[in-house]
Image: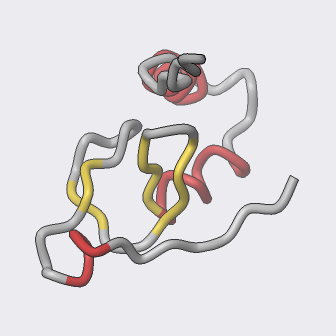
């Protein structure tokens, strides 16, 4: 699976997108389905140990990311 950095139209207008993890506006990051994850949270996700309480918080926040429905 290939992941690329995105800079959406909203980010280019200095509005930013709301990160699903930290719930703060971000300008650079990745999309997971229809949710945005800022680069700082992406770094935290990959660097946080599974025994760290922050890991539980990250998992809870990532559950908010929803997979879009496919209608046929």
In the figure, residue 55 lies in which quadrant?
top right
53 and 65: which is toward the camera? 65
Q: Residue at x 74, y 35 (%)?
A: 49
What colour-coding does the image apply? secondary structure
Above or below: residue 56 compared with residue 8: above
In the depicted view, which residue is nearer to us: 68 or 36? 68
Q: Tell me: residue 60, above or below residue 10.
A: above
Residue 63: where, in percent of width, then height?
51, 17
Count of numbered marks: 0
Task: In the rendered view, tell whether residue 68 sits above or below residue 21.
Answer: above
Which of the two residues, 69 or 52, is positioned nearer the viewer here? 69
Question: Residue at position x 67%, y 70% from top?
Answer: 4
Q: Residue at x 71, y 50 (%)?
A: 47
Residue 17: give x, y in percent of width and height. Answer: 26, 57
In the rendered view, does 26 fall on the left or right side of 35? left
Instruction: Residue at 52%, 29% (x, y): give it.
Output: 58
* Res. 25 image quadrant: bottom left
Where is residue 14 shown, x and y percent of the image? 14, 79
Where is residue 66? Give x, y as percent.
48, 22
Left or right: residue 12 versus residue 68 is left
21 above or below 40?
above
Placement of the C terminus among the 4 image quadrants: top right
Residue lying farthest to the right in this orientation: 1
Horizontal side, residue 9 vs residue 35: left or right: left
């Amino acid at each position: 699976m290939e992941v690329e950095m995105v800079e959406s139209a909203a980010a280019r207008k200095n509005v930013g997108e709301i990160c699903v993890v930290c719930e703060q506006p971000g300008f650079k990051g990745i999309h997971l389905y229809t949710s945005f994850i800022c680069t700082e949270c992406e770094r935290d996700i990959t660097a946080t140990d599974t025994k760290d309480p922050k890991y539980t918080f990250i998992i809870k926040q990532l559950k908010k990311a929803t997979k879009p429905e496919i209608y046929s």
